[in-house]
Image (cartoon, helix red, strand yellow):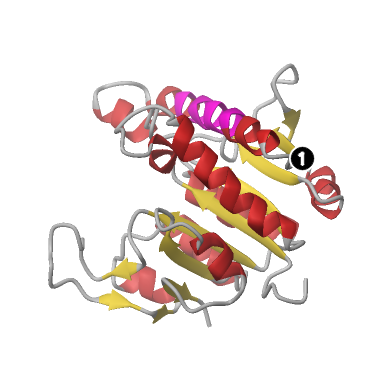
């Protein structure tokens, strides 16, 4: 642990990150690359918990906008996160990283139910823990799940892996003049309307003083660099 800045982290992965260059589904090669990066972090002795989204398979908001009952659509999204979590678990265990999936919706034949103390014990034993099925409640995003689980397991930081290299004042893909922020406070997310995470997640992080680092996942080695304390991406906190 001498070289790592953080002892216990939450890594937030979007579902889209697992799709790689595809726009839908799970790309095995991308999973392999992500798993190798997590292994590097794990080998440092960092306790790693992961929250993964489901947008590569299903988005509850999208289903709701097309006339589906919002709660039903959100539950379908939770099931999508379970599929992604199982795929990530498989990729991690193929590179010899012991991993447990815990779900907020009970499905004992597939994964453990979420139990806070058990999750912490797994981390202390050197296992990676993947939190699936969101909070188990509709109307809450996986960003909020990451904030909630970080508070519950007393993680030191949330690492938000994105396809861009930080937080900008506008979409850098559409606006070449977009300004990148290197440091922000939680309240800036709300006041500036920045597209980092939803307001519930941002407020939860602010209230519990949980820092967030937004960085580019597509650049190999970035997860390790963040854990070592290198100044990349955007730091959000006090």
Question: What secondary structure is found at the residue carrying circle 1?
Answer: loop
Closest to the observer, 20 or 51: 20
Comparing 94 with 228, the one in front is: 94
- Residue 194 is situated, as x and y percent measured from the top left of the image, at 31, 65
Q: Where is residue 70 in the image (x, y as percent from the top left)?
A: 38, 28
163 in relation to 108, above or below? below
Residue 85 magenta-highlighted: yes
Q: How many numbered circles are shown?
A: 1
The image shows residue 157 at horizontal and vertical percentages of: 61, 67
Range drawn in magenta: 76-87
Residue 109 appears in view: yes
Q: Where does label 1 land, which residue? A: 98
Indicate the quadrant containing the N terminus: top left, top right, bottom left or bottom right.
bottom right
> Circle 1: is it few (<14), some (14-19), or many (20+) Cα within 10 Å?
some
Q: In which quarter of the image is residue 99?
A: top right
| Residue 104 visible in the picture | no
Q: Where is residue 211 in the image (x, y as percent from the top left)?
A: 56, 71
Whether 70 is among the magenta residues is no
Name the residue at 49% across, 48% down.
13
Determine the image quadrant of residue 227: bottom right
Q: Which of 41 and 49 is in front in this view?
A: 41
Q: Quadrant location of residue 89?
A: top right
Q: In this view, does 120 lie to the left or right of 181?
A: right
Residue occupying the point 44% across, 29% down:
26
Query: Eyeballing the image, is 28 above or below 154?
Result: above
Q: Main secondary structure of the magenta part?
A: helix
């Amino acid at each position: 642990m001498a070289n790592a800045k953080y002892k216990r982290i939450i890594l937030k992965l979007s579902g889209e990150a697992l799709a790689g260059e595809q726009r839908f589904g799970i790309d095995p090669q991308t999973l392999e690359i992500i798993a190798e990066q997590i292994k590097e972090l794990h080998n440092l002795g960092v306790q790693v918990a992961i929250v993964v989204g489901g947008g590569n398979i299903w988005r509850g908001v999208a289903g709701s906008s097309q006339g589906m009952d919002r709660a039903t659509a959100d539950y379908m999204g939770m099931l999508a996160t379970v599929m992604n979590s199982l795929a990530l678990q498989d990729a991690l265990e193929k590179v010899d990283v012991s991993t447990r999936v815990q779900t907020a919706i009970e499905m004992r034949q597939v994964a453990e139910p979420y139990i806070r103390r058990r999750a912490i014990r797994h981390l202390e034993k050197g296992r990676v823990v993947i939190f699936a099925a969101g909070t188990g409640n509709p109307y809450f995003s996986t960003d909020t799940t990451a904030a909630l689980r970080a508070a519950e397991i007393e993680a030191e930081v949330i690492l938000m892996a994105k396809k861009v290299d930080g937080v900008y004042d506008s979409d850098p893909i559409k606006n070449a003049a977009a300004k990148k922020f290197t440091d922000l406070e939680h309240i800036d997310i709300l006041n500036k309307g920045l597209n980092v995470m939803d307001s519930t997640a941002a407020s939860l992080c602010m209230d519990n003083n949980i820092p967030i680092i937004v960085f580019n996942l597509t650049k190999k080695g970035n997860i390790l660099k963040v854990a070592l304390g290198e100044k990349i991406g955007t730091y959000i906190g006090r």
